[in-house]
Image: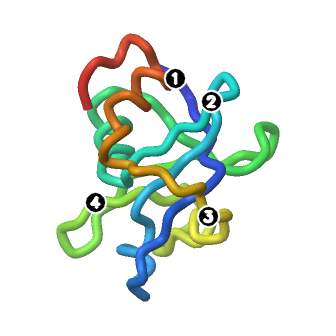
Amino acid sequence: MADFQIRCIKKATRHNPHDRIVSVGGLNRGRRWSLTQQDAVHIIEKLGHRFWVGARDNGVWMVVVMHHGNKYIKTENDEARPDNLLSLPGCPCVDFRAHGHVVMKTLAPRVTTL
């Protein structure tokens, strides 16, 4: 199990906070990584890795929740809305789907499939 800090997000044009985050990203060993929100859900639920936002001393863990049948991630203290994530800056442009598998190898070399 590994822990990764989320430092940026990619937002959709939707107004519903449950659907607005398309992907998340950060740095690991000096290299940028990015994952779709669905991949982050899978990694938390199936692979046991954890994500967090904020400063290491003052960070907040991400959890997976369901709203109207759709799973998404949010911070533990956000009640029903993912505001802590929505307040993060935008990620640099990356083709998230093309790099998802390779990115996870960078994050955790022992992970071979999403």
| Badge 3 vs badge 4, beta-carbon distance below 8 Å | no
Mark nearer the N terminus (1 vs 2)? 1
Q: Amino acid at mark 4?
A: Lys
How many numbered circles are shown? 4
Report which residue position mark 1 lands on.
2
Secondary structure of the residue carrying tag 3 is: loop
**Separation (CA) of disc 2 from disc 3:** 17 Å
- Residue 78: x %, y % from top left: 56, 67
Report which residue position mark 4 lands on.
71
Q: Amino acid at mark 1?
A: Ala
- Residue 44: x %, y % from top left: 38, 38
Instruction: Tell me: residue 12, above or below residue 3.
Output: below
- Nearer to us: label 4 or label 2: 2
Task: Give whichever of 65, 87 is nearer the camera.
Answer: 87
| Badge 4 vs badge 2, beta-carbon distance below 8 Å | no
**Separation (CA) of disc 4 from disc 2:** 27 Å
Mark nearer the N terminus (2 vs 3)? 2
> Image point 44% across, 56% down: which residue?
23
Q: Quadrant of the C terminus?
A: top left
Relative horizontal placement of residue 97, taking residue 78 as reference (left or right) = left
| Badge 3 vs badge 1, beta-carbon distance below 8 Å | no
Mark nearer the N terminus (4 vs 2)? 2
Instruction: Tell me: residue 4, above or below residue 86.
Output: above
> Image point 53% across, 40% down: which residue?
51
**Separation (CA) of disc 3 from disc 4:** 21 Å
Relative horizontal placement of residue 36, taking residue 50 as reference (left or right) = left
As drawn, the label of residue 31 is 2
Report which residue position mark 3 lands on.
90
Q: Amino acid at mark 3?
A: Gly
- Near mark 1 (Cα within 10 A), the count class, few <14, some 14-19 or many ≥20, is few
